[in-house]
Image: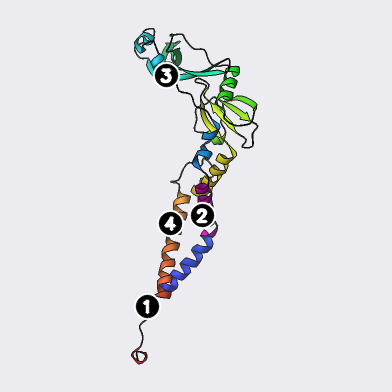
């Protein structure tokens, strides 16, 4: 049995050596990086709408829509003369039938005065990005993108991508409807994400840790550990002394 354990242990060691090293190295890097720096919390200002300022009721807003319309609470960041403020917003969604087909529509209302809000322009997004950015760089590029990069692939599209020329290569991803920053991505986050990819062995989406490759290597690592314990026990277990050597 011990011979079999030694053979299995040796072969597993050869197969798993690189991945076990990557597990330890990636785990060390992820533990070393402060999670708030990874999330970019130090690079953004946040603004919250005060719903006590709302004078319009949901019923008054829904009165001009069908009975199937749904209402949700939201907000919008407004920047006038470099003075940012978040206003409360009602978002009404409904399906409208026409030409034999249904089309989903969304209308946003200012909850303070009841006016319909137009989509945010590029200039408004640029102002919103500048007031929410807390770093030392300056805005260098702004794009309205429909095809999302891997670093924000889980967000709905289209979305605004705003690049700042700081040492962290900061990108803000801004909601086109609210003007709020949804994600902050920096080189620190990208390093963490790369290490996470190595750790969970998902080299495409970097989000699936239930795939066969990870399960197989994890099972192999467990077997490697167990056979190692058996071999250690064989080497260090107490030995019975013969009767002639007792005295």
Q: How far, Cα to Cα, is label 4 from label 2? A: 16 Å
Query: Can you tell which quarter of the image residue 236 is in?
Result: bottom left
Q: Which disc, if any, is residue 201?
A: none
Q: Give the SS element for disc 2.
A: helix
Q: Which residue is mark 1?
A: 238
Q: Which disc, if any, is residue 24?
A: 2
Q: How far, Cα to Cα, is label 3 from label 4? A: 52 Å
Q: Label 1: how many residues lie within 10 Å, few (<14), some (14-19) or many (20+)?
A: few
Q: Is residue 218 magenta?
A: no
- First to last magenta residue range: 16-32
Q: Give the SS element for disc 4.
A: helix
Q: Are marks 3 and 2 in contact (CB under 8 Å)?
A: no
Which residue is at a point 35% across and 88% down the rendered structure image?
Answer: 242
Which marked residue is nearer to the observer: mark 4 or mark 2? 2
Q: Are marks 1 and 3 in contact (CB under 8 Å)?
A: no
First in sequence, mark 3 or 4: give its number.
3
* Rendered view: 9 above or below 134: below
- Quadrant occupied by the C terminus: bottom left
Q: Which residue is mark 4?
A: 219
Q: Label 3: how many residues lie within 10 Å, few (<14), some (14-19) or many (20+)?
A: few
Q: Which residue is mark 3?
A: 50
Q: Label 2: how many residues lie within 10 Å, few (<14), some (14-19) or many (20+)?
A: few
């Amino acid at each position: 049995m011990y011979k079999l354990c030694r053979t299995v242990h040796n072969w597993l060691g050869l197969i798993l050596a690189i991945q076990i090293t990557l597990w330890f190295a990636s785990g060390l890097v992820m533990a070393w990086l402060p999670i708030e720096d990874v999330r970019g919390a130090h690079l953004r200002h946040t603004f919250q709408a005060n719903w006590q300022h709302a004078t319009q009721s949901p019923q008054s807003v829904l009165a001009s829509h069908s009975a199937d319309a749904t209402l949700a609470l939201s907000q919008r960041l407004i920047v006038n003369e470099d003075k940012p403020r978040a206003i409360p917003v009602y978002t009404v969604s409904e399906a409208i039938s026409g030409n034999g087909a249904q089309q989903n529509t969304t209308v946003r209302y200012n909850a303070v005065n009841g006016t319909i809000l137009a989509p945010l322009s590029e200039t408004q997004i640029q102002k919103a990005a500048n007031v929410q950015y807390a770093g030392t760089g300056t805005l260098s590029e702004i794009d309205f993108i429909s095809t999302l990069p891997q670093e924000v692939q889980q967000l709905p599209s289209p979305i605004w991508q705003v690049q700042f020329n700081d040492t962290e290569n900061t990108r803000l991803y801004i909601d086109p409807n609210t003007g709020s920053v949804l994600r902050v991505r920096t080189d620190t986050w990208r390093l963490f994400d790369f290490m996470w990819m190595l750790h969970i062995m998902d080299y495409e989406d970097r989000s699936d840790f239930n795939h066969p490759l990870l399960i197989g290597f994890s099972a192999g690592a467990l077997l490697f550990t167990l056979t190692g314990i058996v071999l250690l026990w064989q080497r260090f277990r107490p030995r019975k002394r013969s009767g002639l050597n007792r005295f």
